[in-house]
Amino acid sequence: MELTVQLGDRSYPVFLNDSRSLPDVLKSRFPDRGFALVTNTTLARLYEKKLAGLDRALGPVRHVIDDGERFKTVATWQAVLDTLLCSRLDRQAVVLAFGGGVVGDIAGFAASAFLRGVDYVQIPTTLLAMVDSSVGGKTGVDHLTGKNRIGAFCQPRMVWIDTRFLDTLPEREFVGGCAEVFKYGFIGGAEMFAFVVAGREKILGRDPALLLDAIEKSIRIKAAIVAEDERESSGKRSLLNFGHTFAHALETYYDYDKLLHGEAVLWGMACAVELGLRAGTVPAESRAEYAAFCDHLPRIQLPSRPSAGDLYAGMFADKKAAAGKIRFVLPAQPGTSVLRDDMAKADVLAAIEAVLDRTSP
Ligand code: NAD
Ligand code: GLY
């Protein structure tokens, strides 16, 4: 199946479970080009044979980064650039990002900077990367002051999704990826809301047909949003941050260590719904529907109970806090969300406390 991210002359295809071989597609779309492949230690080990096939067909320069969000740093990015700069590659190079969101974000950012920018291809291997980070051109690394604070918008030339990679994905990572699928239920329209409500158990159970459908629907929604607001300037793309304002504060609180990104997003979505219910963005007739939806989302158990005040303070460091105001994405009619920067601190704290009561020791 081929989907397209429509961005004029920068439009690109997203191939989903294409029957052709990846090296053949790369060779035909990028003839006579030099390749570099960026991956991490875990994937280099798990997919040794597949990568050897790519080596034989394309002879890419390879750079393997350490595994983990804590390595999503300027230092790792610079090391990728060192490899590219010390190789035979020129401006015709194509960088292949083979991995989850961490590899994709770093490799894409390196491609955006190498010789002032070269092409790159996303080959996502986690569910999260398939439905979210590989599409849309946000690249970058973390900084001590917050997540993804250094980076560039740089669209890939192609995205290659093979859901067989999910066979080796650990369960926790898979559930974390489901968080981003469920997120589209809050912003992708009434039909997506209904699809997620009806299908969440089977999606979580890795039902192949439903999972493929969920991935396709998620990419279509993301591609449409990116096409409309590529640089997050009109507010439309900000809707993709549903649950993320809370999630980023929680991840920062735990030093990106104890929780996965997707787990933090699940927790953050519960906070967003709680705040939406308190602030009245959820219409009265939909309250029960939202409450039931949230009851059936996987419940994250936190390792400790953070202080709601600390999390609130952490939100001001997030990119989404503009001019001293925290911007929230809150649920409205099922399948739609709204941006609000006028939430009373007391309501935010109460929403966080309510979710902490359900999720902390
Ligand atoms: P990740 O890249 O750290 O991958 C999660 C873990 O799964 C890692 O240990 C990895 O080695 C392992 N893994 C990956 N694929 C595997 C496979 N097929 N089999 C077995 N193990 C595998 O994390 P992620 O959840 O993919 O991505 C999270 C990152 O993505 C965060 O840094 C987040 O900020 C970023 N992100 C970016 C965007 C964007 O638009 N650019 C959107 C959402 C998230
Ligand atoms: N994941 C948020 C975005 O791509 O804008």
Image (cartoon, rainbow, N blue to C red):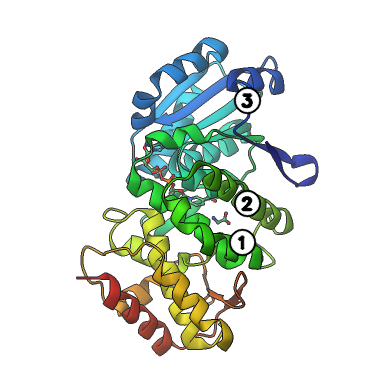
Residue 19, disc: 3
The answer, for residue 356, to whether it is visible in the render is yes
Q: Residue at x 27, y 78 (%)?
A: 357
**Separation of marks 3 and 2 at Cα, in angstroms:** 20 Å
Q: Which residue is drawn at 45% across and 77% down?
A: 291
Pointer 1 or 3: first along the chain: 3
The answer to whether the residues at label 2 and label 1 have Cβ atoms under 8 Å apart is yes
Quarter of the render that holds ligand 1: top left
Residue 47, disc: none
**Could you tell me which secondary element the residue under label 2 belongs to?**
helix
**Could you tell me which secondary element the residue under label 3 belongs to?**
loop
Tell me which amino acid carries mark 1.
Met
The answer, for residue 189, to whether it is visible in the render is no
Give the labeled residue for mark 2.
217
- How packed mark 1 is, by other alpha carbons closer than 10 Å (few <14, some 14-19, many 20 or more), is many
**Could you tell me which secondary element the residue under label 1 belongs to?**
helix
Question: Image quadrant of residue 120?
Answer: top right
Question: Image quadrant of residue 4?
Answer: top right
Nearest to the observer: residue 206 or residue 180: 206
